Image (cartoon, helix red, strand yellow):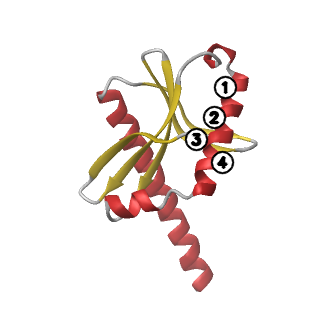
Amino acid sequence: MTRARSTEQRRKSHQRGHWAERLAAAFLMLKCYWIVERRYKSPVGEIDIIARKGGGFVFVEVKARASLDDAAGSISQHQRARIVRAAQYWISQNPEAADADMRFDAILIGRGPSFRHLKDAFGA
């Protein structure tokens, strides 16, 4: 029974993550970002959203928690490093992006839902 419950919790968590990423993508589009990719997976990590605004690329980590503060606190140094490596890998696979500006943002989603868009939340 415990195993079934943990499987169910993982499934719900996974669904909430997809919901948060869809919400974040819509939020970015309303702010005139062009969504290049969602849920990008590379051998070195995953990026929730890759977007373009102006001449640059934005690599976005989406975190949904009970509060915006909880969401902000859930992005570890290890995750940041993994996202940076995944972005570098993506750029190596997309030569047209090599000379473009890039930054790392975070979109935090709390209950309500409430949003916080942290531009340049962490750097390379």
- CB within 8 Å, label 2 to label 1: yes
Identify the residue at horizontal 49%, vertical 20% (top origin): 56
Q: Secondary structure at mark 4?
A: helix
Q: Secondary structure at mark 1?
A: helix
Identify the amino acid type marked 4.
Answer: Arg
The numbered disc on residue 91 is 1
**Whether residue 17 is situated above or below residue 86 in the rendered picture:** below
Upstream in sequence: badge 2 or badge 3: 3
Identify the residue at horizontal 68%, vertical 40% (top origin): 85
- Give the distance between the C-alpha atoms of the residues marked 1 and 4, in whole angstroms: 14 Å
- Mark 3 closeness class: few <14, some 14–19, many ≥20 residues within 10 Å: many
- Give the distance between the C-alpha atoms of the residues marked 2 and 3, in whole angstroms: 7 Å
- CB within 8 Å, label 1 to label 4: no
Q: Is residue 50 left or right of residue 64?
A: right
Location of residue 53 (image quadrant):
top left
Q: Residue furthest left?
A: 112
Identify the residue at horizontal 66%, vertical 39% (top origin): 86
- Give the distance between the C-alpha atoms of the residues marked 2 and 4, in whole angstroms: 9 Å
Q: Which residue is mark 2?
A: 87
Q: Is residue 72 left or right of residue 27?
A: right
The mark closer to the camera, 3 or 1, is 1
The mark closer to the camera, 3 or 4, is 4
- Mark 2 closeness class: few <14, some 14–19, many ≥20 residues within 10 Å: many
- Give the distance between the C-alpha atoms of the residues marked 2 and 1, in whole angstroms: 6 Å
Q: Which residue is mark 3?
A: 47
Upstream in sequence: badge 2 or badge 4: 4
Q: Secondary structure at mark 2?
A: helix
Q: Residue furthest bottom?
A: 1
Counting from the top left corner in percent of width and height, residue 50 is at: 52, 32
